[in-house]
Image (tube, rainbow, N blue to C red):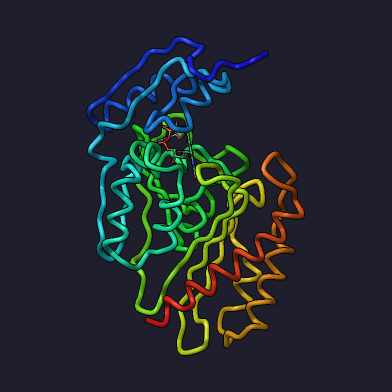
Amino acid sequence: MTVNTRVLINDFTYHVPSTLAEALGFLDQYGEDAAVLAGGTDLIIQMKLGRRSPKFLVDVSKLEELKHLEAGEKILIGAGRRYMDVLPFLQGLGRYHGLAEAIDSIGKLQVLSVATVGGNLGNGSPAADTPPPLMTYDASVRVRSAHQERVVPLREFHTGPGAIVLAPNEIIVAVEFDAFPDGRASAFRKLTRVASDISKVTCAVAVERAGETCTHCRIALGAVGPTPLRARSAEAALEGREVDASAVEECARLIVEEISPIDDIRCSEKYRREAAGVLFRDAFASAWERAKC
Ligand SMILES: Cc1cc2nc3c(=O)[nH]c(=O)nc-3n(C[C@H](O)[C@H](O)[C@H](O)COP(=O)(O)OP(=O)(O)OC[C@H]3O[C@@H](n4cnc5c(N)ncnc54)[C@H](O)[C@@H]3O)c2cc1C
């Protein structure tokens, strides 16, 4: 059957609440029959393809409670903030290059103008671009239901392809992470088929250095396993060690062994393994250099 991606094939009731409490009330009432709508750049496509058919759409784009952009001891990014607002915010802070590079690589203007970080997390794709840099920042996801608020470490948020820990009555309110100490820096690298496409492989790195010694290391990758993942054995191999070419090569080798990519329409498992090592070397070199300043 040919799918017409221009039309929404199922009927639904559309709600545009003006407060978070109202939105949470709808989700509590409708449960699994409802879906949260932010920019719609994932959800509406899935509805047009018939992969999802919620009976109720709860549009969160008007909720001020999801629009935080704060920089203090913690950096707080509201789930409902569009990328086109988050990107200049991060660029203005000048320290969180990895996340800024990931956002800058997404879609292009039409997508950046409407899509949100909350949607990128809510969609649960292992190939999504913001989770790897956020994982290297040890970020957490702030989640609310009508009954409670909880803070979930991002490393526990994804449970499988398209699967996350969110209950049907919960809304992602924000993502947050500790402000970087001096001497920490990050970078992100990505490979795609064409510019405006989902990633084939991504790699994010955050490092801290004392001279030539790496005192803190986080490495995360996307599209190389069922969820975005941390390369923990590679991190352990670098942390506390003097950085030279052989240390970086050992890490790249550990990453290639640690990931579990698949063959799919975008590229082969073998290509992904080799590309992961290449992207890591490049992202690491960039973050390491930035950490010098
Ligand atoms: C042309 C094109 C190019 C793209 N390129 C990229 C790319 O380069 N990299 C990339 O990572 N993605 C890309 N995407 C995918 C998409 O744009 C992103 O994942 C985007 O961040 C989704 O955000 P959204 O606000 O549009 O989410 P929506 O589509 O509104 O929602 C996505 C999912 O998250 C849930 N959700 C949204 N907000 C919340 C919330 N606050 N609380 C709970 N659940 C929520 C929704 O219910 C839905 O399940 C692209 C999409 C298109 C159409």
**Compared to 146, does 187 lie above or below?**
below
Measured as percent of width and height from the top left, residue 293 is found at: 37, 81
Foreground: 18 or 10?
A: 10
Ligand 1: give its quadrant. top left
Q: Is residue 44 visible?
A: yes
Measured as percent of width and height from the top left, residue 92 is found at: 26, 62
Which image quadrant is residue 219 in? bottom right
**Compared to 211, does 84 lie above or below?**
above
| Left or right: residue 152 compared with residue 247 | left
Q: Most extreme residue toward the front, as rendered?
A: 194
Q: Most extreme residue toward the right, as rendered?
A: 270
Q: Most extreme residue toward the top, as rendered?
A: 11
| Left or right: residue 284 compared with residue 109 | right
Count of marks, rendered view: 0
What residue appears at the point 41 percent right and 30 percent down from the top-left corner? 40
What residue appears at the point 54 percent right and 72 percent down from the top-left corner? 284
What residue appears at the point 26 percent right and 34 percent down from the top-left corner? 63
Foreground: 139 or 25?
A: 139
Foreground: 204 or 29?
A: 204
Which image quadrant is residue 16 in? top left
| Left or right: residue 195 compared with residue 37 | right
**Compared to 153, does 144 lie above or below?**
above
- Assign the N terminus to one quadrant of the image: top right
Measured as percent of width and height from the top left, residue 55 is found at: 45, 15
Q: Is residue 172 visible?
A: no
**Compared to 142, does 240 lie above or below?**
below
What residue appears at the point 69 percent right and 58 percent down from the top-left corner? 259
| Left or right: residue 166 compared with residue 118 | right
Measured as percent of width and height from the top left, residue 37 is found at: 39, 28
Foreground: 215 or 185?
A: 185
